[in-house]
Amino acid sequence: MRIARFAVGDEVRYGVVDSARDGNVSGGGNGNGARSAELAVAEISGHPFGPGPDDVRLTGNQYPVDDVRLLAPVLPSKVVAIGRNYAEHAREFGNEAPPKPLIFLKPSTSVIGPGDLIVRPVALSERVDFEGEMAIVFGRLCRDVPPERVPEVIFGYTCANDVTARDLQASDGQWSRAKGFDTFCPLGPWIETDLDPADQQLTTSVNGEVKQDSSTSLLIHDIATLVSYVTAVMTMLPGDVLLTGTPAGVGPVVAGDSVSVTIDGIGTLTNRVVDSD
């Protein structure tokens, strides 16, 4: 099931993304009308975090995806991220793969949604990089989760871009500033609740040219290990996000670039880059 957070006018809602059902689509502002093959979002009553993704209640309202604005699928209290979790990515910067997960944080204010603008802070940084990743979305409050119980606390998965001011990462000696700028954590386009994360192809393209092409099967520390490790340190709340690491092939972006992160079984997250004023 694909769970989206979206806006209709000024109202923010949650919904289930699927093929439109004939005769059951509101809107149609693009002039195409309701077609069974087009994607639509069926509105959910309330929010999806609670009894479980399979227990969501639909309101009966349904909209063509093209007629709504998809938002970041969650507004997390925190984004926990994992560094150097693909061996080739560690090597491309001359680093060894860490024996244990390397944790850092991105602020909630760095989160943006599909189609939103990544803003390069040109007064402070000369190099801003893309980093395509798979993200875990937590569905319940949890702490000290043993590996065998990790599936119980995961709501689903989405695409992420761990945007990084690479020069600041090198100069600061720690990563908070380099990873923490507003707009530096695009998420979306929705949450896939029914996914085996163990072997999904992950690609990142810039202006249509593939830059990263890997698989989540190459994660050094797998999903169960990451969740267990992180929740031994801190409590995760419903809607919190864990970025699982980026594969090799990261690189700089400039104003006007369009960056797309695609994960099989989830979808594609696309954001354009602009320079700050």
Image: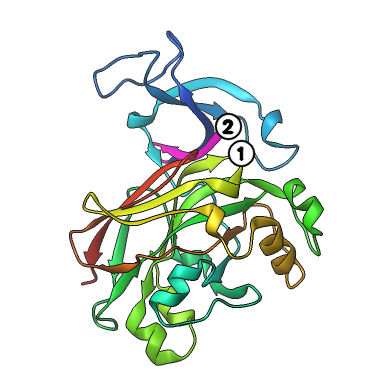
Q: Residues within 10 Å of mark 2 (few under 14, many from 20)?
A: some
Q: Residue at x 44, y 74 (%)?
A: 179
Where is 253 relative to 217, above or below? below
Residue type highlighted by circle 1: Thr
Question: Which secondary structure dominates the residues rendered in magenta?
Answer: strand
45 vs 159, left or right, is right
Say whether residue 78 is magenta.
Answer: no
Residue type highlighted by circle 2: Met
Task: Return the x and y of residue 55 as percentages of the image width and height.
Answer: 71, 29
Quarter of the image with the C terminus in it: bottom left
Q: Looking at the image, is mark 2 or mark 1 earlier in the sequence?
A: 2
Q: Residue at x 47, y 66 (%)?
A: 109
Task: Return the x and y of residue 40 as percentages of the image width and height.
Answer: 43, 25
Where is 44 relative to 266, above or below? above
Q: Which residues are magenta?
A: 2-10
Q: Which residue was labeled with disc 2?
A: 1
Quadrant of the image occupied by residue 39: top left
Q: Which mark is residue 130?
A: none
Q: Residue at x 60, y 76 (%)?
A: 102
SS assignment at label 1: loop
Can see residue 54? yes
Quarter of the image with the N terminus in it: top right
Can see residue 75? no
Task: Return the x and y of residue 81 as percentages of the image width and height.
Answer: 55, 67
Camera-nearest residue between 239 and 61: 239
76 vs 187, left or right, is right
Q: Are marks 2 and 1 in contact (CB under 8 Å)?
A: yes
SS assignment at label 2: loop
Whole-angstrom CA distance, mark 2 to mark 1, is: 5 Å
Task: Return the x and y of residue 178 as percentages of the image width and height.
Answer: 41, 79
Camera-nearest residue between 259 and 29: 259
Q: Which mark is residue 193?
A: 1
